[in-house]
C-alpha cells in the first residue's frame, strides 16, 4: 500500500550476542504507519523503544527484518543511500533538544535546510513560519541556553520538520518537562504534525498524552501489539 509511510517488518535485534550480557530487545516487531497517522509507542524503560526508533530512522541496523520508508526498502542499501533516505524523509526529536548551542533558534532551523540545498531566503521564511506556529517566534534570535526547556523542545520540533520529512520519530519528546509544560508542548507538537500531514511514531511514558494520538502500540517481549 502506498499510503504506508513507514513499514517495519520482522525486526529483530540482540545486543551483546553470545555473551552472558546478551539481551534480545526486538523479536519480530512489525509496524505499518499510514500517512497522516500519529501513533504512540508505550512501554516501560528498557523495553526497547529507543532501539526501535533508531532502527526505524536508519540510525541503527536490525539483525533481521526490513525498514521501508515512503515505499523504499532500506536494508541491504549502502550508507549513502540510507543517509539520503533519512535526510529526505525522516525527522527526529529526542528527550533532550540537541540544538547547536552557538547558533540562535532561527539558525538552528535554517541550517538543516541549507544543508539540504534550500536557498537562504526560503529557509529563513520556513524557519520563521515554524517558530510562529509553535509560539516561539519572539525568541528566534536567542540561543538555546536562553530558552526555557519547553521553548527548547518547540524549537527542536521545528528543526526536525524543517526539511518537510514524511515521518517524524520522537523519543519521549516531553520526558524532561514538568507535567503542565509537557502538556502544552505536546499539544504544539501534535498541531504541527497535523498541519504538516506527517506520520508520527512517538514514544512516551505518559498514557494521557498517548491517548491523544490516533492509536497506541505497546512494545512487549520484543514485539508490537495494539494497546488500550
Ligand atoms: N548499545 C547497546 N549495547 C548493549 N545494550 C544496549 C544498547 N542499547 C540498549 N541496550 C539495552 O537494550 C535494552 C533496550 O534499551 P532501549 O532501546 O534504550 O529501551 P527504552 O528506550 O525502551 O528504555 C536495555 O536493556 C538496554 O540496556
Ligand atoms: Mg529510550
Image: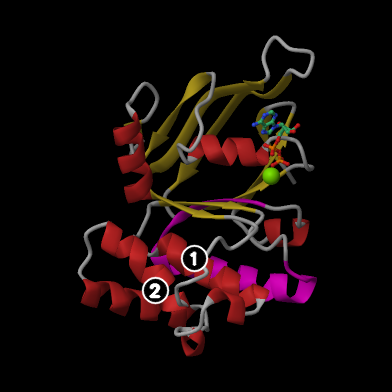
Q: Name the residue at 48% across, 63% down.
A: 193
Task: Report which quarter residue 78 is drawn in.
Answer: top left
Q: Secondary structure at mark 1?
A: loop
Find out whether the residues at labels 1 and 2 contact each other: C-beta distance under 8 Å: yes
User: Which residue is at the front of the view, 1 or 102?
Assistant: 102
Please tell me whether residue 144 is drawn above or below residue 63 in the rendered image.
below
Residues rendered magenta in the picture:
177-203
Colour option used: secondary structure
Q: Position of residue 194 (x, y in %)?
A: 47, 65
Q: Name the residue at 55% across, 74% down.
A: 144
Q: Which mark is residue 177?
A: none
The residue carrying pointer 1 sits among few (fewer than 14), some (14 to 19) or many (20 or more) residues within 10 Å by Cα, namely: some
Which comes sooner in the sequence, label 1 or label 2? 1
Residue matched to label 1:
100
Please tell me whether residue 96 is drawn above or below residue 32 in the rendered image.
below
Residue 195 falls inside the magenta stretch: yes
Residue matched to label 2:
107
Please tell me whether residue 218 is drawn above or below residue 191 in the rendered image.
above
Amino acid at each position: 500500500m502506498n499510503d504506508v509511510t513507514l513499514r517495519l517488518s520482522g525486526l529483530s535485534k540482540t545486543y551483546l550476542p553470545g555473551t552472558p550480557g546478551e539481551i534480545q530487545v526486538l523479536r519480530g516487531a512489525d509496524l505499518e504507519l499510514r500517512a497522516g497517522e500519529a501513533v504512540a509507542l508505550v512501554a516501560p524503560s528498557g523495553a526497547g523503544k529507543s532501539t526501535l526508533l533508531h532502527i526505524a530512522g536508519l540510525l541503527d541496523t536490525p539483525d533481521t527484518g526490513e525498514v521501508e520508508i515512503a515505499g523504499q526498502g532500506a536494508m541491504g542499501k549502502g550508507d549513502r543511500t540510507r543517509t539520503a533516505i533519512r535526510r529526505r524523509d525522516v525527522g527526529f526529536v529526542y528527550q533532550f533538544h540537541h540544538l547547536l548551542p552557538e547558533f540562535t533558534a532561527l539558525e538552528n532551523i535554517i541550517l538543516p535546510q541549507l544543508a539540504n540545498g534550500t536557498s537562504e531566503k526560503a529557509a529563513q521564511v520556513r524557519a520563521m513560519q515554524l517558530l510562529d506556529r509553535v509560539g516561539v517566534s519572539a525568541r528566534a534570535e536567542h540561543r538555546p541556553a536562553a530558552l526555557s526547556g519547553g521553548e527548547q523542545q518547540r524549537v527542536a520540533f521545528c528543526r526536525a520538520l524543517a526539511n518537510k520529512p514524511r515521518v517524524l520519530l520522537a523519543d519521549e519528546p516531553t520526558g524532561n518537562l514538568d507535567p503542565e509544560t509537557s502538556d502544552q508542548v505536546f499539544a504544539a507538537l501534535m498541531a504541527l504534525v497535523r498541519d504538516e500531514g506527517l506520520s508520527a511514531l512517538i514514544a512516551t511514558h505518559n498514557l494521557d498524552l498517548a491517548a491523544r494520538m490516533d492509536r497506541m502500540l505497546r512494545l512487549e517481549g520484543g514485539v508490537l501489539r495494539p494497546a488500550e
